Amino acid sequence: MKIELAKSYGFCFGVKRAIKIAENSSGAVTYGELIHNPLEIDRLKKEHNVGLAKSLDEIMSDEVIIRTHGITKKDKEILEKNGKKLIDATCPFVTKPQQIVEEMSKKGYDIVIFGDEKHPEVKGVKSYSTNQNRTFVILDVEELKNIKFREKIVVVAQTTRKVSEFLTITGYLIENYKEVRVFNTICNATFENQDAVRELSKKADVMIIIGGKNSSNTKQLYLISKQNCKNSYLIENEDELNPEWFKNKNLCGVSAGASTPEWLIQNIINKIKQIKD
Ligand code: SF4
C-alpha cells in the first residue's frame, strides 16, 4: 500500500505564528486553547512552560497569550483592567473580520456572520459589533429567511467555512436586499488544504485525516474527504488507527487540519507503515 500526503496539509500561517509567539513566552498562560490541538498544548506546557487557563478566574500569570482565533472584546477589556500583559497571537485573518464588524456596525450596517455561533472565533468576531441586536450569526439560508434586515447589510464568514456555502448565502442576500457588502474572510489556508484533500480523496482507497476532534477546519477536511472516499477516518493520534481500515487497500491518503503538528503527522504515517507491513 502506498501512502500519499495531500499537497497542502497541517499547520497554516496563523498557527505557526501563534506557536512561535507561545514558544517565546515562557511563564505565560494562554486564555483558552491556543490552537485546537491537545497534544501541541501539552508540548508547549512541557517544553516551554506555557500554561492553559480555561476561564478568566484560572489566570494566575501576569502574562496572557490571546489564542489564534481570538477572544471577545469584553474579555480583552477585563484582562486589561486586571493589569495583565496581553500577548496577542490572534491570527491576522481573524483580526480582520473583528475590525470589519466593529467599523461597519458603527456605520449602521446590519451584520451577518456566516458561522457557528458556539465557536470561539465567531463569539469573538460578534463581540466587536457595536449593535448586538442587529448582528446575526447564521449557518444557512433558511435562517436568513426568518430575519427582516434593514437596508444596509455587511456579510463576513468564519475563516474556516466552505466557499460554496458562503456564495449561496451572499447570493440570497444580494437578490433580496439593496445594499449588501460582502467581505470574503474565509482564509486561504482553508482553501488550500481543502482543495488538496478533495484531489487526493478522489483517488485514495482509504483516507486518514489527522486533527483535534473539536477543530472545525479538521472536520471540514474530513467531510470533503468522506464525500469522495467512504473509507475516511478522523483521528487525533496513532492509537486510534485500526488495522482493518488498511486491508486490501492500494493507496492511503493522509491530510491534517490547520492545527496539527508535523511530528504528530509523521508518527501516524510511521504507524500506518508498520500496520501494512
Ligand atoms: S486557518 Fe487561516 S484563519 Fe485560521 S489560524 Fe490558520 S491562517 Fe489563521
Image: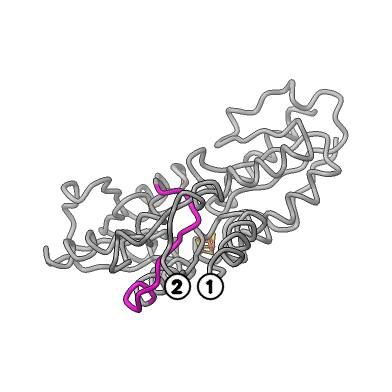
Q: How many neighbours does mark 1 have within 10 angstroms: few (below 14), some (14-19), or many (20 or more)?
A: few
Residue located 46% across and 69% down the image = 153
Q: How many neighbours does mark 2 have within 10 angstroms: few (below 14), some (14-19), or many (20 or more)?
A: some
Residue located 63% across and 45% down the image = 265
> Hey, what amino acid is under mark 1?
Lys
User: Which residue is disc 1 drawn over?
Assistant: 178
User: Which residue is disc 2 drawn over?
Assistant: 152
Res 65 seen here = no
Res 94 seen here = yes
Figure check: 33 above or below 222: below
Q: CA distance from mark 2 to mark 1?
A: 7 Å
Tell which of 86 and 129 is nearer to you: 129
Outermost residue on the top side: it is 244
> Hey, what amino acid is under mark 2?
Lys
Q: Position of residue 219 (x, y in %)?
A: 58, 42
Q: Position of residue 21 (x, y in %)?
A: 39, 66
Residue range corresponding to the magenta coloring: 104-117
